[in-house]
Every structure is written in structure tokens, then in C-alpha cells.
Amino acid sequence: MSDKLQKKNPDSLKETSQYALAFGLVATMLFVAGFPVFVIFFFGIFAYILWKTFSQPTRSEAREIFEFYLSANELLRDDERRWFGFEIQEVIGRGERILQLMNGAPPLVYFTLGALYNKLGDHKSATNHLSYVLENDNADETGYNYPSPDLRNYVRILRKIEREPAKAPQTSAAVRSLERARRNRGRALLENSRLLLEEQNRKKHEIALEQKRHKELAERNAERAAVSATEKPFVSVVQTEPNGHANENGRAASLAEKPPTPDDENQKKKKRKNAEDAFANRKPISEVLRDIYDSK
């Protein structure tokens, strides 16, 4: 980042000089006491490593807080930019890491995390963080009477930024913007998260009830299907032919005959007439016998 806060602290030269003076004084005393030079040199290197190990996390912890402010303010700013979910989650992860590592994190960190959770849609976490910083008297800055070294170093850098904002303009603007949002929009964000959380819980409850009803209905249908499969189906002993009449093995009465139509009467008359015509030209039996005897 171009912010001057991200550059090396000019006080580091002063701290290094103090360490060099202290080491020189202790080394002189040990040399006068008769310790070998290589032992003094070894203890000097060991002390320097310990000093860097225990002093560097304090400075980096405060730097991480202000970097978190810069990133979060960029996400929460109303500039019509559309952020991806993983971008918001990455910044939230940095804020959660600060809460885990720092003993007595600043209240502004809690508020910023709550606002980010609200933007992401995790209203349960947003409600937890916002309610802690807005409704808990112990979360106010005046309640921090016994600061940890990390918090003391953070406050020292914060006051320096407030006194000389030109040295870290981006960080100063981010802190002022977040503090203004905490003061003006904190309650509204908390109420919004609570309402949306209730709505989410109501929808989850309705979905659970609907799934339960579907499950019970499926179980009842399965039971009915099992009962139907165990019952013996009824088979009729009367078999009907395609014309609707019972066959010779059936005991049911045949269907009623259809009433005769004029066409049926005409057909019957024609059949009788043809039968009469067929026997009209036949000779009587006496003539037939006479013809037989005459032929003999």
C-alpha cells in the first residue's frame, strides 16, 4: 500500500540504538568480570534474537489491525462496487485472527467485523459482534483500564495518526469513516441483522416442517402400498365373450336381445321367398315313382 503507515517505523532506529548501548554496557561489564569474548558475543546474539522475537509481534499486531481497517473500509464504502463473497470472507478472516491473537481487541474491530458479517449475509455473527460492542458497557473504550502490550502499542500508533493524519492519510480516513459508521449506523445495522435473522429462522422452520410433512406422506404411501401388495386380488368366475353374453361356463343371464328393425324383417321375407322358389319346380312324389317304373 502507498500509505506511510506500511513503511518502516522511524522509531526502529531509536530502539536499535538503545539496544546497542545496552549491549555495549553489559558486554563491558562481563569483559571486566573475566568472561571470554566469544561467550559475550554468543550471549549478545542470543539476547538480540529474543528481543526481535518478542518485540516484533507487538508491532505487527498493531499493523495488522490498521491494515484490517483499510480493507474493511474499502468493502463497506458505498461506491457502487460489487464485491465477491470470498473477498469479504478473507477480510473477515483477518479480523477474526486479530480477536484470537490479541488480548483485549479494540471495540472498533468488533464493530467492523459485525458490519462485514451484515454485508456478507451472516446475520447471526453480525448480531453477536454488533450487540457486544453496542449493548455491552464493558465493550466501551472507557472500560479498558488494564491494557495489554498489544493494545497499548495500538493506541500509541492510533494517537499518532490522529495527531498527524498527513503521515498516514488513508489509515486516518479509514479509522474516521469506521468510527462515524459505528456512531451513526451501528444501531440500524444491529436491528437490520436481527430482523433478517428472525426471517431466516422462520424460513428454516417452515422448510423443516414442509420436509417433515413430505416424509410422513411418503411413509403413509409406502405403508398403503405394502398393505395392498399383501391382499389377494378378487377374480370374477364369470367370463364374458366379446358380444357381451356369458359363455357356457357362466351362470349370468345373457344380455337382452335387440328389438327387430325394418331391415331385419325385409331380410327374413327375402329368405323365405327364396326358399319357396327353390321348392316350387319340384315334381310330386307319385310322378317321380311313375317315371322310374316306366323307364324300367
Image (cartoon, rainbow, N blue to C red):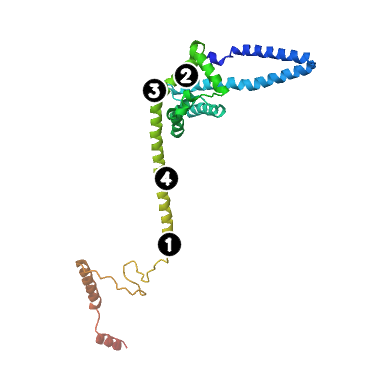
The type of residue carrying mark 2 is Val
Front residue of 199 and 184: 184
Residue drawn at the location 43% of the way across and 58% of the way down? 223
Residue marked by disc 3: 184
- Pinpoint residue 158: horizontal percent, then vertical percent: 51, 17
> Image quarter for residue 31?
top right
Callout 2–callout 1 Cβ contact below 8 Å: no
Callout 4–callout 1 Cβ contact below 8 Å: no
> Image quarter for residue 115?
top left
Of labels 4 and 1, earlier in sequence is 4
Of labels 2 and 4, earlier in sequence is 2
The type of residue carrying mark 3 is Asn
Q: CA distance from mark 2 to mark 4?
A: 43 Å
Residue marked by disc 2: 175
Front residue of 97 and 21: 21
Residue marked by disc 4: 208
Quarter of the image containing the N terminus? top right
Q: Is residue 166 visible?
A: yes
Q: Nearer the viewer, mark 2 or mark 4?
A: 2
Q: Secondary structure at mark 1?
A: helix
Q: Secondary structure at mark 4?
A: helix
